[in-house]
Image: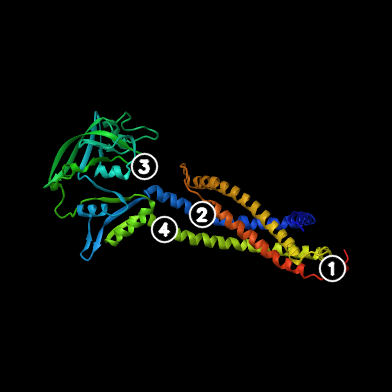
Amino acid sequence: MKFNDQVKLVRRNMKKNRLRVFMTILATTMGCAFLIMLASVGFGIHKSVTEEIKKQQILTEVQVNGSESKDGYKAVSKEDVEDIKKIGGVKAVVTRITSMGQLEAKLDDRKGDVMAVITNMEEEIKAGMTLDKGRLPEKENEIVIGYHFASQLLTEKELSTEAQEGETRGYTGELLNKEISFTLTTETDGEKVSKDFAFKIVGIKKEPSRDWIVDSNVYVGESLRDELIPPGSIPKDFDMPLYNEVKAYAKDMQSVQIVTEELKSKGYLVYSVTEELEQMNMFFTALKAGLIFVGTVAVLIASIGIFNTMTMAVTERTQEIGIMKAVGAQPNIIKRLFLMESAYIGIMGSAIGVAISYAISMLANKVIPIIINSTTESDGSMDFTFSYIPVSLVVIAASISIGVAIVSGLRPAMKATSINVLSALRREL
């Protein structure tokens, strides 16, 4: 019997009792859809948390927080920075420290308190500092400002009144290539000392990816460190580190793990997003495996219906099986016909279950945020994926559903091959 003939025979037999077959496919559909939707919650949370972590930190960034030795904790020194630069796979080492005292920016009739971040501009260029406008500084008196710097420049009236909802405050003109005056006030030997600076704005940083982050800093070169952090302004009992931040940037994602392990071997205390993602991936892998296991139970329950349907099909077609064996049909052909029927039920149930799962997933991602916002009286948009169905989950769920369906039909198919020809032919229709 040709394969096409086998398919036609299977389709004809499936049409004999459409209601029973439909109910069996429906049970398989529900089991497959339940498996996918349950596991999709784990995949959705994993996806959302991973994206959130990636937004907060550059993937090739490795934070260096000093080193630990027998003598105790040691802050990062200039020698350490040079040592880190020599590690294979490191393309840049950015060092930052904030200015001491109060730094006031002035432009025309506007002023505001900001913070100066002293950094190595050459390393910032290598690390890939991104700007919204302008360029990076090339001279000592050139600076880069944060995206929200303009909003800190307020008039006397704006300083004395509270901001109203929807009100635009701060400087609204173009700051690029403008010269801004600054006054740094520090306390030296118990006395307040003020010093004036004049800087030209040559670049404006891009807006932070998180809405709640306000970047109104001023980024200046390391050559002005002693000017912005006068030695006398540091309290004698205060052990101030040379840098507030030290970040090593790997050449690519493949080099991050190598750089991290090399830094650890040298005794540095480091943190990289890849380490956090690795630990998190282990947790979510276990969670998703558990959810898939629970969902598989629903598919196994549906397999009972497939077993009953195929057993009844064998019983009803006993005489037909006897005729097929009498005309020379091989037992493997008969077994294959019934396995094809059970596989058909599994395939149809899986296909419908996948379609329903995608529809429910899209609906859940739209409706759940609305419900949460209404209950919490929040107007902001919720950037969170509650349900995510990757192709891998579809393949896993479909494989389990179809596999269970075939296994469920195996016993009835074996029974069909063992039917006695004479007994089957004597049986009344």
Q: Amino acid at mark 3?
A: Pro
Q: Disc 4 and disc 2: Cα gap in Å? A: 15 Å
> Which of the two residues, 160 or 369, is positioned nearer the viewer here?
369
Check contact, mark 1 vs mark 2: CB within 8 A.
Answer: no
Q: Disc 1 and disc 3: Cα gap in Å? A: 78 Å
| Label 3 sits on residue | 208
What residue is shown at x 61% (from left), y 60% (from top)? Answer: 400
Ranked by sequence position, the earlier of labels 1 and 2 is 2
> Which of the two residues, 95 or 90, is positioned nearer the viewer here?
90
Depth check, mark 4 against mark 2: the one in front is 4
Q: Position of residue 363 (x, y in %)?
A: 57, 46
Q: Disc 3 and disc 4: Cα gap in Å? A: 25 Å
Depth check, mark 1 against mark 3: the one in front is 1
What residue is shown at x 62% (from left), y 55% (from top)? Answer: 33
| Label 1 sits on residue | 424
Q: Could you tell me which secondary element the residue under label 3 belongs to?
A: loop
| Label 4 sits on residue | 278
The correct choice, above or below, for 404 with respect to 89 in the image is below
Q: Amino acid at mark 2?
A: Phe
Q: Position of residue 143 (x, y in %)?
A: 25, 37
Q: To which quarter of the image does residue 39 belong?
A: bottom right
Q: Position of residue 284 (x, y in %)?
A: 47, 59
Ranked by sequence position, the earlier of labels 1 and 4 is 4
Q: Could you tell me which secondary element the residue under label 4 belongs to?
A: helix
Ranked by sequence position, the earlier of labels 2 and 3 is 2
- Indicate left or right for 56 with 427 as reference: left
Q: Position of residue 172 (x, y in %)?
A: 33, 30
Q: Amino acid at mark 4?
A: Glu
